[in-house]
Image: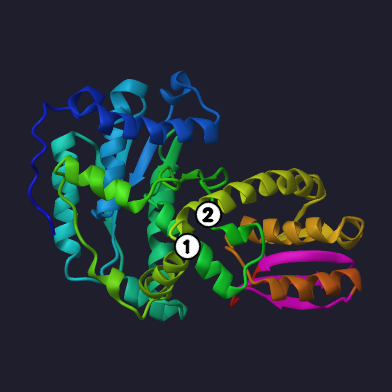
Amino acid sequence: MKEHFNFHSALPLHLAAIKPKQADFCLSVFKILQEKLNISRKELQNISFLLAISGGVDSVAMLAIFKACQQYFGYTLHVAHFNHGIREESAAEEKLVQKICKRLDIPLTMDKGNTPLYAKEHKIGLEEAGRILRYAFFSTLRQQEKNCILCTAHHANDLCEDMLMRLIRGTAWPQLAGMSYFDPERKLLRPLLYTSKQELSDFAEQLDFPFARDTSNTDLSFLRNRVREQIIPLLEKENPKFYQNILKLKQNAEYDETHFQNETNAVLTHLEQCENKLAIPLAILQKNDKTIRLHTYRALLKKLGQGHSVTATFEKLDTAVMKNQGSSEFKFSNDVRIRIQEKKLYCFIKTNA
């Protein structure tokens, strides 16, 4: 872990305190943010950004970017740090985040969870358990602040890894193109999604910011690490511009997603809330084309917190919808189910009660 803090410029950290090239880099991140969110500099003054900071180089770079631009744009900053209770280094990372936030005069809220225990009790993997626990913590904090947007430090390399993992799992287009830049329902923003890890690492190093190195990132028992360490290098060997092509594909997916979202919203105007279930009449689904039906199924699952699902399951579901196959039930992860019954499609979370 790089623990020293050699940022010598006068505090608070702002654009005038760093080199012009570094300031331009910070502003380029916000240029994309303003374009994607369609938000003006004046409107940013009313926003509170909750930064999810692990202490790794990516999140530390994000923290430095947002702190450097805060005076110029006038938004509010708050940092959240979650200790998963897995690695021995976690305590040191907590102290590092505390040190950085104190140095930069940024409010910090921390929490800790027993991820291994949660994974065991819910019969899920450590990675999924950690994601559930930390986002529950972040969501609770975000809802306590007005006009608050949660920011994570996912970058272009993460996007590439996510896309390949979805391809391996059989995710359908356009979700195949990876995580979104902004999720309005969750108020979740990934401001670095079009920025490379190398750019972030260089920026943090140039400012002499301290950061931690997560040793679990080299553990090949995790699919993401195998994709990063073994698969992507082979693809880059075949095409050195692989990452750039991934970003172009992401842009095309966003254009398609915008179109499909408008069409899907029209179908969702017929959505019914029945007890703890979401329901849509089969007749409404059947009069739309298959592409819109598939997007509607995904939209329903998303409303229940379900992430991307495999194409094969949607294909079977759609066949049942078109054939009016009553009593058909389809299982998704996290106990989410879709059932066809009484000429309606029901989406719900199964309980043990």
Q: Is residue 134 left or right of residue 172?
A: left
Q: Is residue 242 left or right of residue 312?
A: left
Q: Are marks 1 and 2 in contact (CB under 8 Å)?
A: yes
Q: At label 1, which amino acid type do we have?
A: Asn
Seen from the viewer's position, the closer of residues 106 and 190 is: 190
Q: Is residue 128 visible?
A: no
Q: How is the image coloured?
A: rainbow
Report the residue marked by disc 2: 245
In terms of image quadrants, where is residue 36? top right
Q: Is residue 156 magenta?
A: no
Relative to 251, is 93 above or below? below
Q: Quadrant of the C terminus?
A: bottom right
Q: Quadrant of the N terminus?
A: bottom left
The stretch in magenta equals 325-348
Q: Which residue is mark 1?
A: 239
Q: Secondary structure at mark 2?
A: helix
Task: Count neighbours of disc 2 (C-alpha within 10 A) and say few if under 14, some if 14 to 19, many if 20 or more.
Answer: few
Q: Between residues 327 and 75, which one lies in front from this camera angle?
A: 75
**Marks 1 and 2, the one that precedes in the sequence:** 1
What is the spatial separation of the Cα atoms under label 1 and label 2, in whole angstroms?
Answer: 9 Å
The residue carrying pointer 1 sits among few (fewer than 14), some (14 to 19) or many (20 or more) residues within 10 Å by Cα, namely few
Residue at image x 78%, y 59%? 279
Q: Is residue 121 left or right of residue 25?
A: right
